[in-house]
Image (cartoon, rainbow, N blue to C red):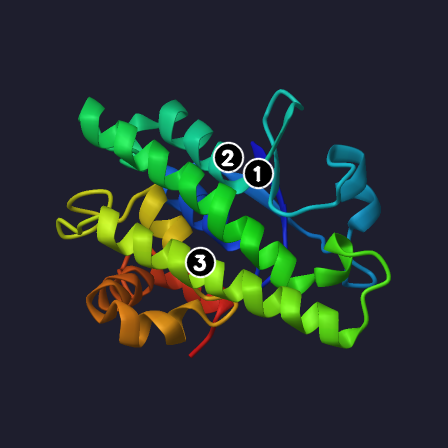
Amino acid sequence: MYTLYGFKGCGSAVVEIALELTAQSYRLVEAASWEPGSAVDQLQQCNPLKQIPTLQLADGSVLTESAAILLHLGLSHPASRLLPDDEAQRAQAIRGLVFIAANCYAAIGVIDYPERWCVNADEAVKEQIRQGARERLYNYWEIFADTYVASPFLGGAEPGALDLLAAVVSKWSGARTHLATARPAFLVLIESIETHPRVAPVWQRHWPG
């Protein structure tokens, strides 16, 4: 059985949905560094960075980083179609997962915690950092939208790992508001992912309504 450390409304939602799509049994442990009373100490034993999602495998080994977890689940459970069967399409899905993790996720980290990137920054400097990071984030999403064409989803006939990660990460830092004007067709695709019957039950638990 898998053990997933995560919290409502966070990036762990993408792994929770993926686990449902693989039809694998798992235990959900609520843990978040900002949430008193959650299983943070237990999380830290598995992941010293105390980041979620963190996934403990049946053999006790640990996987961190959303893209790495999704790749593992897709490769371990090919019938789930988290990753495309076609080799060329699968390669592009892997590229997209790493793109979001390396670019979009990274920019969001700067927006959320600008003080980590500039010593002794006052509020004016922090806001300048946030603004620059937002501009880069929105540009990353434009590039992503121009690179990946839905057929009808990014992963093919059904939502796959790339669809799930794009849907979750685009919820943060105003990305969807920007996409509504910059890439409206892509936003329609993203919104269709979260309402898909295979995705909606877990999605509604994290983002009701």
Relative height, residue 206 to residue 22 (above, below): below
Mark 1 residue type: Glu
User: Is residue 157 shown above or below 30?
Assistant: above
- Residue at the location (32% across, 50% down)? 163
Pointer 2 local density, CA inside 10 Å: few below 14, some 14–19, many at least 20: many
Task: Find the distance from the CA under tag 1 to the CA under tag 3.
Answer: 14 Å
Mark 2 to mark 3: distance in Å? 15 Å
Residue 124 position within the rendered picture, expressed as x and y whole percent measured from the top left: 73, 76
| Mark 2 element type | helix
x and y, in percent, of residue 49 in the image: 75, 41
Q: Position of residue 6 (x, y in %)?
A: 63, 51
Query: Which residue position is annotated with label 2?
Result: 69
Q: Where is mark 3, residue-wise? A: 168
Element on which disc 1 rests: loop
46 on left or right of 130: right
Which residue position is annotated with label 1? 65
Please identify the quarter of the rendering in which residue 196 is found.
Answer: bottom left
Left or right side of 195 for 7: right
User: Do the CB atoms of the residues marked 1 and 2 lie less than 8 Å apart?
Assistant: yes
